[in-house]
Image: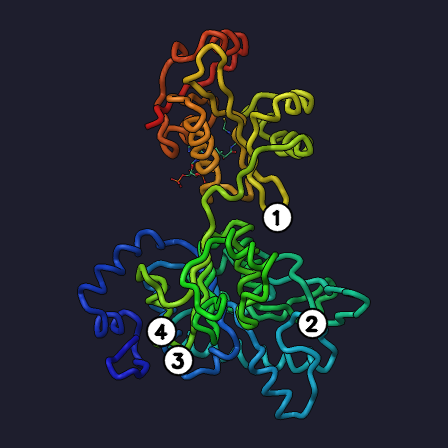
């Protein structure tokens, strides 16, 4: 925290807040606290930032986040230290950021650099009275041969041991994750830390990734862009990548990947700025770049090619009688009613929206299902909200839902109210009575 003279304060996080934040700042911060409490932030720190003099201040800021109930996972890079070691020992390296080939000598230096950086983080967290742990939670696979070139010891993330990390987080321990993963034979593989942060965010259902780097943010057309949507950034990456500054490219690619796999926001900021991390999180302007997803971007209309996936997705819910059985043929026949939520080209949730020919102002939301791995991330609500939005766009004023086991979800989470079967259009009432399921009828008026 600031002491007014730009120096790090060797003190606990709580007293650091007390000495430096004005009441007006505090009010601003408190607005965000309930929103962020209990959420997981992945903080990805480039090796160069760990070597910077602001590193000590950053650790105090991280301690502040922890004291406010925000769960933090730290990922670090090693590019800067790897280059330093290579120069000091006069050992050439094949690559410094874990994206190209990693030969045996480079891997050896990368492991040394990583141990040093992890230790610096553990030491700094200890000085700030935070419990932390380095882990072997990242399972990697060799990238293999790309365009005829063997990438040797460069790895890609195969699996994150999310239960292990969640257990640490629940015990108030800050996991420190290094860019060295472990292959199937237990041997080390070099992984890019930007990618690692995106993978961790997906596995742990994080709400933010904060990349701390040596640039002021994402530089597009020669200037730092303060905010950009994932659609706009994806478009630039696909069609005009030269608009992005070289040092912004990896962060941009991984920000897009992270948002596509369910992380709502990615921040990229200069880790050398004093108080930058707290300002980025707790002020509406921020100091770096924010890449944000559209709430509904992962929802699309279902296609015929999705039929089998939808059938497989909902099978378990049908077994538990949460959903009505539909054959693949029935799903295909009504595919126009389905919307799906897609992550990495996998369908992880679905919902239907049906209009009654005899009562066009009423629409029914049904077949709502979210894969259990993705439960409690707001996807179910998003699907229902999206269906309600589409219903309204198509002229409906009322949406109904029938549910045997999730009526609490519709009423408590989605703003529906319980009603009687008399609210059903005539043709639907007959089907309802014939089914014998005795589902509760819920209704929502569209404002
Ligand atoms: C019900 C379902 C769609 C919820 O999806 P989800 O993505 O986990 O839901 P969200 O993340 O948007 O909302 C989570 C909230 O809903 C609550 N919730 C989930 N299922 C619930 C249920 N059956 N009854 C009451 N509340 C429920 C959670 O407790 C959580 O509450 P909180 O925000 O206060 O912590 C999902 O659990 C599911 O697919 N269930 C099986 C199929 C089913 O029953 N479908 C509905 C029939 S039409």
Q: Residue at x 41, y 84 (%)?
A: 53
Q: Which numbered disc, 1 or 4, marks the residue closer to the eye?
A: 1
The earlier-in-sequence mark between 3 and 1 is: 3
Q: Which residue is mark 2?
A: 100
The reply to whether dot 3 and dot 1 touch (C-beta < 8 Å) is no
Q: Mark 1: few, some, or many residues within 10 Å (few <14, many ≥20)?
A: few
Report which quarter residue 349 is drawn in: top right
Q: Is mark 3 within 8 Å of ligand 1?
A: no
Can residue 170 be seen in this snapshot? no
Q: Which residue is mark 4?
A: 60
Q: Which residue is mark 1?
A: 344
Q: Which numbered disc, 2 or 4, marks the residue closer to the eye?
A: 2
Disc 2 and disc 1: Cα gap in Å? 23 Å
Tag of residue 54 = 3
- In the displayed orientation, state which residue is furthest to the right: 148
Residue 45 lies, in percent from the top left, at 49, 71
Quadrant where the C terminus lies? top left
The earlier-in-sequence mark between 2 and 1 is: 2
The earlier-in-sequence mark between 2 and 4 is: 4
* Location of residue 242 with respect to 430 vertically, above or below: below
* Front residue (pair 23, 305): 305
Disc 3 and disc 2: Cα gap in Å? 30 Å
Residue 203 lies, in percent from the top left, at 55, 53
User: Which secondary structure lies at badge 1?
Assistant: loop
């Amino acid at each position: 925290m600031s002491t007014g003279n730009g120096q790090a304060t060797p003190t606990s996080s709580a007293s650091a807040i007390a000495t430096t934040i004005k009441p007006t700042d505090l009010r601003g911060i408190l607005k965000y606290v309930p929103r962020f409490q209990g959420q997981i932030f992945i903080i990805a720190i480039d090796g160069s930032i760990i070597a910077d003099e602001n590193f000590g201040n950053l650790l105090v800021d991280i301690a502040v986040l922890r004291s406010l109930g925000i769960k933090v996972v730290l990922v670090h890079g090693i590019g800067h230290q790897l280059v330093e070691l290579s120069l000091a020992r006069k050992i050439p390296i094949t690559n410094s950021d874990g994206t190209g080939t990693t030969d045996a000598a480079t891997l050896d230096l990368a492991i040394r650099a990583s141990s040093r950086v992890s230790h610096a983080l553990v030491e700094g967290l200890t000085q700030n009275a935070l419990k932390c742990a380095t882990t072997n939670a990242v399972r990697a696979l060799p990238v293999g041969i790309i365009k005829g070139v063997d990438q040797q010891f460069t790895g890609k993330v195969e699996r994150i041991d999310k239960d292990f990390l969640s257990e640490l987080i629940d015990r108030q321990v800050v996991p420190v994750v290094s860019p060295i993963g472990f292959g199937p034979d237990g041997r080390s593989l070099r992984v890019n830390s930007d990618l690692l942060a995106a993978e961790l965010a997906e596995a742990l259902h994080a709400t933010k990734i904060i990349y701390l780097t040596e640039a002021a943010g994402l530089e597009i057309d020669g200037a730092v862009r303060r905010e950009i949507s994932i659609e706009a950034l994806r478009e630039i990456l696909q069609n005009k990548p030269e608009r992005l500054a070289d040092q912004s490219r990896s962060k941009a690619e991984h920000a897009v990947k992270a948002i596509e796999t369910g992380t709502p926001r990615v921040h990229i900021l200069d880790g050398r700025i004093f108080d930058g991390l707290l300002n980025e999180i707790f002020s509406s302007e921020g100091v770096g770049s924010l890449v944000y997803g559209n709430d509904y971007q992962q929802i699309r209309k279902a296609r015929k090619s999705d039929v089998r996936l939808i059938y497989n997705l909902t099978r378990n819910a049908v077994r538990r009688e949460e959903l009505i059985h539909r054959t693949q043929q029935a799903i295909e026949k009504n595919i126009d009613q389905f919307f799906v939520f897609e992550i990495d080209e996998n369908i992880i949730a679905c919902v239907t929206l049906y209009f009654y020919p005899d009562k066009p102002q009423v629409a029914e939301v049904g077949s709502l299902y979210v894969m259990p791995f993705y439960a409690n991330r707001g996807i179910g609500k998003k699907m229902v909200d999206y269906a309600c939005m589409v219903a309204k766009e198509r002229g409906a004023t009322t949406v109904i839902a029938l549910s045997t086991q999730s009526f609490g979800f519709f009423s408590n989470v989605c703003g529906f109210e319980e009603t009687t079967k008399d609210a059903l259009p005539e043709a639907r009432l007959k089907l309802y009575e014939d089914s014998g399921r005795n589902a509760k009828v819920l209704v929502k008026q569209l404002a």
